[in-house]
Amino acid sequence: MKDGNGDRQGGGFDLVVIGAGSAGFSASITAAEAGKRVALIGHGTIGGTCVNVGCVPSKAMIRAAEAVHAGPSSARFAGIAPCEHALDWPALVADKDALVGRLRQKKYADLLPQYDNITYVDEGPASLVDGGVRVGTGNGARVFKAGRIIIATGSAPARPEIDGIDAVPVLDSTALLALERLPESLIFIGGGYIGAELAQMMARFGVRVTLLTRSRLLSGADPEVSAVLAQAFRDEGINLLEGLSYRSVSGGADGVSVTIEKDGRQTTLSAAALVATAGRRANTAGLGLTQAGVETDARGAIVVGPDMATSAPGIFAAGDVTDRDQFVYMAAYGSKLAARNAVLGGDGRYDNAAMPWVVFTDPQVAGVGLSAAQAEAAGLRVKTSALPLDQVPRALAARSTRGLIKLVADRDTDRLLGGQIIAPEGADSIQTLVLALKFSMSAQALGETIFPYLTTVEGLKLAAQTFDRDVAKLSCCAG
């Protein structure tokens, strides 16, 4: 425990924050910088999911897989012979772990001494009690009291409900990134962003990968975008099966088997190991939410209002433990909002209208705002523009035209409503569209904006022009 402002153990706090990940730190620092006294209660490893087992390690390994894949894929350029890179898996995992350790120390542990009015407590499980938070169990438990509480305990990988799955070893995203050696083959259950990223990563490391999904790959993305990524996966040798149902899972000396049903026929697939990437569940067990009057939804996530307040007076929540967007940057945003509203007299409201999302596959998938279906469901008259990457000079020069850019606009006002990109540099390109939506830009204005030539982001300009022009008839850099 760290108490940098005298002995306040058990009382005298303005705010108690449960969870020491991105959301918990954001809330605590926001309140502390305004002079409030904060008790930050650890919940798992300091730093939470993102730095320890999520964003940081996965993206480091995905980038390494891209480097491995660059050798064979270089043959797309005339005059370059493909090559194979040697892979030292234990060394790669150790390097990833070292990066995680450095960032956890620098961005979390080393920050605590800089805030005298934050008391960090990591002495055991936390639970809500009348007037505060109990930490620890038995005679050693103590209660930290405050007028306001923020729950930011995050989430953990969920295991799908399939007959027999509890009787076999199942890897989750955390265990997969910590394997001591690469398996010959893997079956992934779940085609969301986690499954898509990790399945392609492992395939590029030389593992035979089967990816199973009940609906379609990246079901949250537009169908055109999903189809492009699905074809890219199949081109790389991933056995992608969509639109199926799971019948059973079994294990044996040689690995695991999954029986599925697709188009009325049952098939059994086998691999050395099984990876469950079918979503995440909120970390709420043992918090005493029911007794405290904190409402949860059908998935167990805490229900919060636009001000991040729960159904219980004085208790707020933020991040993956809530029913809001499960992205680390939205967790930090939501927890800062919760802290301001809880103890700083704020009245801010959660706003995700211009929230970008990114999937770090190759090509990358990114989006912001409304899809055409969402806009129509909201009662808007829409128009769409879809630009294949073979109309983007950057993609032609890079010899990689897998992808497209799709924009959605209001037919009556021409105001941009949303868009999605699937392109090698889609993750970095989406922020331009974020700003266009944030400042209510029209499609015409985006199409008339000056963009640098031979960039992926220039595709946004071309896609905006495609609403009413045939860009194939324009010369390079045509405005």
Image: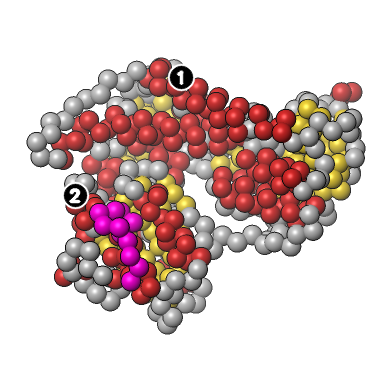
Asked which secondary structure carries label 2, the reply is helix
Instruction: Work out whether residue 359 or residue 30 is closer to the camera in this orientation and state it.
Output: 30
Mark 2 or 1: in front is 2
**Tags 2 and 1 touching, CB below 8 Å:** no
Residue at x-position 32% and y-position 43%: 362
Task: Examine the structure image and report whether residue 457 is included in the region drawn in magenta.
Answer: yes
Q: Amino acid at mark 1?
A: Ala
Q: Where's residue 403, x and y in %? A: 28, 53
Residue at x-position 42% and y-position 46%: 359
Q: Is residue 302 visible?
A: no
Task: Examine the structure image and report whether residue 295 is included in the region drawn in magenta.
Answer: no
Q: Which residues are magenta?
A: 448-458
For residue 130, the mark is: none
What residue does disc 1 label? 94
Judge from the rendering whether residue 370 lies leftward or rightward of residue 332; answer left or right. Answer: left
Q: Where's residue 408, x and y in %? A: 39, 69
Q: Amino acid at mark 2?
A: Ala
Instruction: Work out whether residue 308 or residue 192 is closer to the camera in this orientation and state it.
Output: 308
Quadrant assignment, res 8: top right
Asked which secondary structure carries label 1, the reply is helix
Q: In whole angstroms, how far apart are the C-alphas of marks 2 and 1?
A: 36 Å
Residue at x-position 29% and y-position 71%: 465
Q: Where's residue 312, x and y in %? A: 81, 53
| Quarter of the figure with the C terminus | bottom left
Q: Where's residue 27, x and y in %? A: 70, 45
Q: Main secondary structure of the magenta part?
A: loop
Colour theme: secondary structure
Residue at x-position 52% and y-position 43%: 279
What residue does disc 2 label? 397
Judge from the rendering whether residue 447 lies leftward or rightward of residue 349; answer left or right. Answer: left
